[in-house]
Image (cartoon, helix red, strand yellow):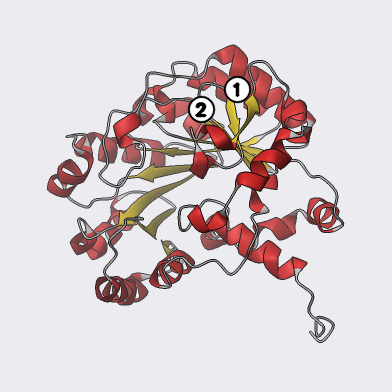
């Protein structure tokens, strides 16, 4: 499989034809993937992070994580991604949680800032299918200016250490492009040869004041360096150029992706973490079956106005695909 196919979300739903067919026939489906916030703590304060001002001391406890993972597996969930309002590796039970998920037969991946990789080499190299390290800078100076921390050299060391392991995980470095770091786009590409990693990945940082002229210039520069292992989220850059306008009128992606925060709250969408009107239930006191099959999901869905959702939201690309499939096409038989 090409590295690009591991990252690009636009076609993955077609690898689950039975679930997709069930949905298109109007039947209830359970998520294919869940994103779990193992921690609300973070040692960084990235300029573009929507949670930077609200990090909390919460970490998900082992018993709750175990309950969630086994319930998810029983409902047909295929994978769990550790991401979050905080840094997943700050959960002291990380290794035990990943061992439970592995016993449950769930595929696992993680988005991490990379600062604590050296404390979890074994589960990261052997139990993850991917480790995505958000570095977002090519120099120490830019890293410190945008993340307000001096961990740059440590993250580089940790990246090299993990990449050199005999590992199952695909390891990549991520670069969120913003006006604050865009001068280092080309320099960041050099990390592909400096470390034995599988890919580097460029995405746009979502800010409220995007300069279209600057964005077009960035897109042209990225086109020059894009390659089989130098990946660019072109669909995100193009959507941002189009002001993130949605071609669909309803969100269906949340049926396939679910978000659970460190306190056990289950949300309609992770982009609406801690917005109480979008909370579906509490995994501490309810089962995932009760939450995903309950009446509240319909009540919450009615409150969702996608025109007010963040642009380039987590299920955005999936929603575009689903919208195409749902719409009638009188020429669909002419391939």
Q: State the image coordinates of residue 157 (x, y, percent, origin top left).
A: 27, 37
- Tell me which residue sits at (33%, 43%) in the image: 49
The residue carrying pointer 1 sits among few (fewer than 14), some (14 to 19) or many (20 or more) residues within 10 Å by Cα, namely some
Note whether 50 is above or below 253 in the view shown. Answer: above
Does residue 1 appear anywhere in the picture? no
- Tell me which residue sits at (22%, 52%) in the image: 138
- Tell me which residue sits at (61%, 16%) in the image: 64
Report the front residue among 293 and 62.
293
Left or right, 183 with reference to 41: left
- Tell me which residue sits at (23%, 62%) in the image: 182
Left or right, 313 with reference to 154: right
Quadrant location of the C terminus? bottom right
Residue that badge 2 annotates = 123
Q: Is mark 1 on a helix, strand or loop?
A: helix
Quadrant location of the N terminus? bottom right
The residue carrying pointer 2 sits among few (fewer than 14), some (14 to 19) or many (20 or more) residues within 10 Å by Cα, namely some
Report the front residue among 41 and 100.
41
Query: Where, by quadrant of the figure, is residue 278 drawn?
Result: top right
Q: State the image coordinates of residue 321 (x, y, percent, origin top left).
A: 66, 65
Query: Where, by quadrant of the figure, is residue 70 drawn?
Result: top right
Left or right, 235 with reference to 203: right
Does residue 92 appear anywhere in the picture? yes
**Whole-number angstrom distance, CA of label 2 to CA of label 1:** 8 Å
Q: What element carries label 2?
A: helix
Q: How many labels does the image show?
A: 2
Report the front residue among 174 and 240.
240
Q: Do the residues labelled 2 and 1 touch (CB within 8 Å)?
A: yes
Left or right, 310 with reference to 70: left
Residue that badge 1 annotates = 99
Note whether 239 is above or below 57 in the view shown. Answer: below
Residue projecting furthest to the left: 141
Marks 2 and 1, the one that precedes in the sequence: 1
């Amino acid at each position: 499989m090409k590295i690009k196919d591991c990252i690009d979300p636009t076609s993955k739903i077609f690898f689950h034809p039975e679930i997709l067919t069930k949905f298109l026939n109007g039947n209830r489906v359970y998520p294919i993937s869940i994103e779990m916030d193992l921690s609300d703590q973070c040692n960084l304060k990235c300029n573009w992070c929507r949670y930077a001002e609200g990090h909390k001391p919460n970490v998900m406890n082992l018993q709750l994580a175990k309950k969630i993972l086994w319930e998810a597996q029983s409902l047909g969930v295929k994978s769990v991604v550790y991401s979050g309002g905080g840094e997943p590796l700050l959960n002291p039970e990380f290794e035990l949680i990943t061992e439970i998920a592995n016993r449950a037969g769930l595929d696992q991946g993680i988005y991490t800032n990379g600062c604590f990789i050296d404390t979890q080499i074994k589960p990261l190299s052997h139990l993850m299918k991917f480790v995505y390290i958000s570095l977002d800078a090519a120099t120490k100076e830019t890293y410190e200016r945008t993340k307000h921390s001096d961990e740059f050299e440590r993250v580089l060391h940790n990246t090299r250490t993990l990449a050199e392991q005999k590992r199952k995980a695909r390891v990549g470095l991520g670069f969120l492009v913003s006006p604050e770091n865009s001068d280092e786009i080309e320099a960041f590409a050099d990390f592909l040869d400096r470390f034995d990693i599988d890919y580097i990945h460029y995405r746009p940082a979502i800010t409220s004041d995007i300069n279209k002229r600057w964005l077009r210039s960035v897109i042209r520069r990225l086109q020059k360096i894009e390659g089989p292992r130098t990946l660019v989220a072109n669909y995100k850059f193009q959507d941002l150029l189009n002001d993130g306008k949605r071609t669909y009128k309803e969100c269906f992606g949340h049926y396939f992706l679910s978000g659970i925060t460190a306190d056990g709250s289950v949300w309609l969408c992770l982009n609406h973490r801690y917005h109480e009107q979008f909370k579906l239930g509490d995994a501490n006191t309810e089962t995932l079956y009760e939450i995903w099959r309950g009446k509240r999901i319909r009540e919450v869905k009615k409150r969702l106005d996608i025109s007010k959702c963040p642009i380039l939201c987590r299920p955005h690309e999936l929603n575009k695909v689903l919208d195409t499939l749902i719409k009638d096409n009188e020429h669909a038989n002419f391939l």
